[in-house]
Image (tube, grey):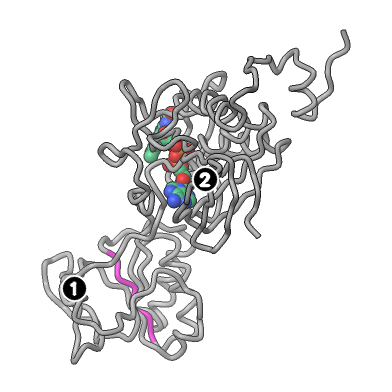
Amino acid sequence: MPIKTDVVIVGAGPVGLFQVFELGLLDLKAELVDSLSKPGGQCSELYPEKPIYDIPAYPSIGAQELVDRLLEQIAPFNPGMHLNQQVERFEKKEDGRFHVVTSAGTEFDAGAVIIAAGLGSFLPRKFRAKGLDELVDPPIHYKVTERVRFEGKRLLILGGGDSALDWTMELANIADHVDLIHRRAEFRGAPASVEKVKALAMEGKVTIHQGMITSVLHEAGAFRGLELMDLEKNKCTVSGDEVLVFWGLAPDLGPIADWALDIEKKQIAVDTEKFQTSIEGIFAIGDINTYPGKKKLILSGFHEAALAAFGVQKYLYPDKRQFVQYTTTSPIMHQRLGVESPSK
Ligand code: FAD
């Protein structure tokens, strides 16, 4: 059975999160979907520890702290949170509602859709090299789902961050051998992990290589290894059975590009009254949208969320009279927020 809701919000970045709040004030229920494993979008994924200086009333706030505060602020509205899944498609039904489907098979029956998808879904950076297309069944992995597959194998792990280091330590225990290949001598991961990986290299369980991958070695369609060019521009080969790629995540517009919306330079065109897209009932806010004068700032996204909430209310209840109520003084707002109304 599809989950019935007023609004599906595509993306749980800072702007998608604040959208829940603005909808909640208007008594509209929202379900959030994000392809990442945690909410927070760019703030949590790209710069969690950096201070932000242009959020009103916070002279300085850490990016992750902002996300934590937003989660606290929307808690009274108890949104559904569907992580690790991408919104893949939707269909507008005759009654104006939307049937929305995610990559995990979650289905929604939503009154409206708000796209707060930022720069797109964060997906693993893909491995590409000469010779890759010659492989019949490329043994290239971007996550470890079945550890047993790697038992007794010669593994080539690509990357220099925490994921590459963690999986090197983990799989060195079960693999025949691990070759860790990173383009630089310095690793980006936690210093303690770097020390442990270096200790495994001393024991001979791991070999550390520095350099760029120039091509894939293959024989009759089967993977044999990788050719590298080291930092002194010498070529060498590293043979192996399986490749695990941990080059981090990069945003990709993904399925949104196929949703028949007006798109200009990878951004969704909206009006500035309601932030509605070219399809009535679908709204777009935050970094994903474009309009004259658009600035990709969290502050702008928050403003867009407030107006989009009224736009959604109008779409769902065209005859309802709209008026702004202050959270300071309105008993209805206090009831929705679950706070006590001050006595007169
Ligand atoms: P995002 O934060 O990009 O979140 C979008 C979410 O949507 C992502 O989590 C993504 O996984 C998800 N998603 C996308 N497509 C799908 C799909 N099909 N299905 C499911 N989920 C999907 N702004 C400021 O105002 N001040 C600053 O000081 C500042 N500093 C910055 C510093 C850095 C290093 C960077 C990179 C950005 C900075 N920004 C700053 C910009 C700010 O982070 C963005 O404006 C903000 O994150 C936009 O929020 P958003 O919610 O629109 O999108």
Answer yes or no: do the residues labelled 1 and 2 have beta carbons within 8 Å? no
Q: Main secondary structure of the magenta part?
A: strand
Quarter of the figure with residue 197: bottom left
Q: Is mark 2 within 8 Å of ligand 1?
A: no
Quarter of the figure with residue 137: bottom left
Instruction: Residue 45: tell me if it is visible.
Output: no
Q: Which residue is labeled 1 in the image?
A: 228
Amino acid, disc 1 = Leu
- Give residue 4's position: percent from left, percent from top: 65, 49
Quarter of the figure with residue 187: bottom left
Badge 2: residue crowd in 10 Å (few <14, some 14–19, many ≥20): few
Label 2, secondary structure: give it: loop
- Give residue 147's position: percent from left, percent from top: 50, 81
Q: Considering the image in quadrants, where does the C terminus appear?
A: top right
Quarter of the render that holds ligand 1: top left
Of the two numbered discs 1 and 2 in the rendering, the one whose residue sits closer to the viewer:
2
Q: Which residue is labeled 2 in the image?
A: 94
Residue found 52% across the figure and 41% down from its top: 113
State which tag comes first along the sequence, 1 or 2: 2
Range covered by the magenta-colored residues: 177-182
| Left or right of 160 on screen, residue 41 | right
Badge 1: residue crowd in 10 Å (few <14, some 14–19, many ≥20): many
In the picture as drawn, the residue positioned furthest to the right comes out as 343
In the picture as drawn, the residue positioned furthest to the top comes out as 344
- Give residue 87's position: percent from left, percent from top: 48, 53
Residue found 34% across the figure and 25% down from its top: 294
- Give residue 189's position: percent from left, percent from top: 43, 58
Q: Considering the image in quadrants, where does the N terminus appear?
A: bottom right
